[in-house]
Image (cartoon, rainbow, N blue to C red):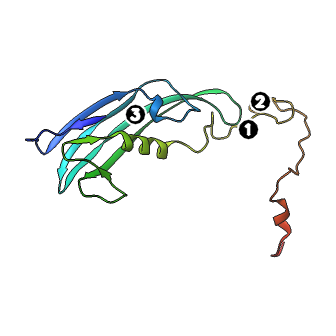
Amino acid sequence: MIINIPANSKDQISFAFEEKAEPFLPDYVHPDRPIKITGELDRISGGWRASGIIEYGFEYKCDLCAKDCEYSNSIDFDEAFLVDNNEDQYHFDGNKIDLTQLVIDALMLSLPSRLLCKPDCKGLCPVCGTDRNYNQCDCKIDEVRNNPFDILKDIGGEK
């Protein structure tokens, strides 16, 4: 996703890319369409400002019940690409801008921490495997789990 800046470039350049999604998304999801990146470059002092939209989607299994699901999202971006920059900014060499790292960063920050089929998913019973979203089982689930941090609950403080 490299944008070549012509020597006699104007103050604004439009761009549109459609790329395979696999290199940009984590291995635990399955892209169901290409990633689309559209936007504009605007000339600023010392570089360019890139702004636009990234659209993507993928299929996944719910983290709690393993149901097949789909996810899609569009995210806005607005970042500066400067010749003289610090570590918090994107760099360009004067005649081309590579949007790859910007797209990776934006996608990773936009992914949900848990991929659920619905916000109130009850998941599978850890004993019999019943999907608790549809059926309630009679399994006895040990309330006290083997948690190495349980020992800390009795340390100091009032109860």
Q: Are marks 1 and 3 in contact (CB under 8 Å)?
A: no
**Within 10 Å of the Cα at label 2, are there few (<14), some (14-19), or many (20+) other Cα atoms?**
some
Q: Quadrant of residue 51?
A: top left
Q: Quadrant of residue 15?
A: top left
Count of marks overlaid on the render: 3
Q: CA distance from mark 1 to mark 3?
A: 30 Å
Q: Circle 3 is placed at which residue position?
A: 55
Secondary structure under the numbered disc 2 in the rendered image: loop
The amino acid type of the residue labelled 1 equals Lys
**Within 10 Å of the Cα at label 1, are there few (<14), some (14-19), or many (20+) other Cα atoms?**
some
Q: Quadrant of the C terminus?
A: bottom right
Q: Are marks 2 and 1 in contact (CB under 8 Å)?
A: yes
Q: Earlier in the sequence, mark 1 or mark 3?
A: 3
Q: In the current view of this chain or complex, which residue is farthest to the front? A: 93
In the image: residue 18, left or right of residue 11: right
The amino acid type of the residue labelled 3 equals Glu
Secondary structure under the numbered disc 3 in the rendered image: strand
- Labels 3, 2: front one: 3
Q: Earlier in the sequence, mark 3 or mark 2?
A: 3
Disc ID at residue 131: 2
Q: CA distance from mark 2 to mark 1?
A: 8 Å
The amino acid type of the residue labelled 2 equals Asp
**Residue sitting at x 26%, y 47%:** 92
Tell me residue 30's x, y (percent): 54, 27
Tell me residue 121's x, y (percent): 69, 37
Q: Earlier in the sequence, mark 2 or mark 1?
A: 1
Secondary structure under the numbered disc 1 in the rendered image: loop
Q: Circle 1 is placed at which residue position?
A: 122
